[in-house]
Amino acid sequence: AFAFAMPAHAARIGVLSNQNAAATAADFTGRLTGHTFTAVEIATVTPPLATLVNNFDAILLFEDGLFANAPNVGNVVAQFAQTGRPVVLGSFYEQDRSTTTSVAASGWGALESLDPNISDGFGTAYSARSLNPTSLVVHPLTYGVKTLAAHQFAGGNQAKSGTIVLARWAQPNAHGARDPAIALRFTGNACVMHVAIAADYSSYGAYGSVYSGDFYPLWQNAFDFAAAKCIVGNDQIVDSGALPAAPSNGGPVAVPALAEATLALLSLLLATAALGALRRRG
């Protein structure tokens, strides 16, 4: 297997939430490197698309508590994603998705046509979650990630058909099906990631207590990948035998294309092997 070496791109990240946006931006500023984080309050105000495009290279969107403005925000974030700028979703996004029936969800408007997961009907699980290490797929989003745990603010999703599921929780969702922890979806120009754990966990307790494991490396990966426009660069070689796991709904697997450098290296290795075989026969 080959390791990923993420390119050194700096990104301006807009942290959009109806609650704890400023606290999360400050937490990530202190814990992560290479990017700037700016809080955007969206509880009652929807930022114009031009403002988002002019100020941010990528967006982190999450909520903490249901709010009626979610569809308006979802519409403009969908437009932002369709410009080719990546979007990262965190819990409790699934709580307000229109497929959540256990609460009075408002939905996320047009963003629901681009997001990787539907909710499992209940949304974010209020029980402990831990990462299933055997479910990890080699990818820039999972680089260096081995463990992840949450005391209750994670999970509650089901992958759409065609979504790339890169890791799952060890615990099932409300339907008893596999619950995606890290998921990625491409739709036209839009790249939308879903890291199904509360981005604002630092507002609820100390790291190592209520949340633990490779929480910060995972978010670092997400923003690094967003900064790279969701492209695996030509200097990054992935183990071609590590394919994405099947979505939890049994749909087809979406397999990302190998980078040009990978194909060139594989072609060179095959050509060398073939030449060696011919010489041995001679």
Image: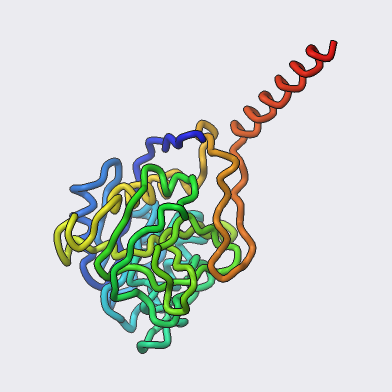
Residue 30 in picture, x, y percent from top left: 18, 48
What is the total number of numbered labels drawn onto the structure image?
0
- Asked if residue 85 lies left or right of residue 96, the reply is right
- Which residue: 27% across, 78% down? 65
Residue closest to the far left: 206
- Which residue: 25% across, 56% down? 38
- Asked if residue 150 lies left or right of residue 237, the reply is left
Position above or below: 81 against 75: above
- Which residue: 29% across, 59% down? 149
Residue 35 in picture, x, y percent from top left: 30, 45
Residue 34 in picture, x, y percent from top left: 29, 41
Inspect this view and state whether residue 136 appears: yes
Q: How is the image coloured?
A: rainbow
- Which residue: 18% across, 55% down? 208
Position above or below: 166 against 175: above
Q: Locate residue 68: give its quadrant.
A: bottom left
Residue 93 in picture, x, y percent from top left: 37, 71
Q: Locate residue 274: give its quadrant.
A: top right
Residue closest to the far right: 282
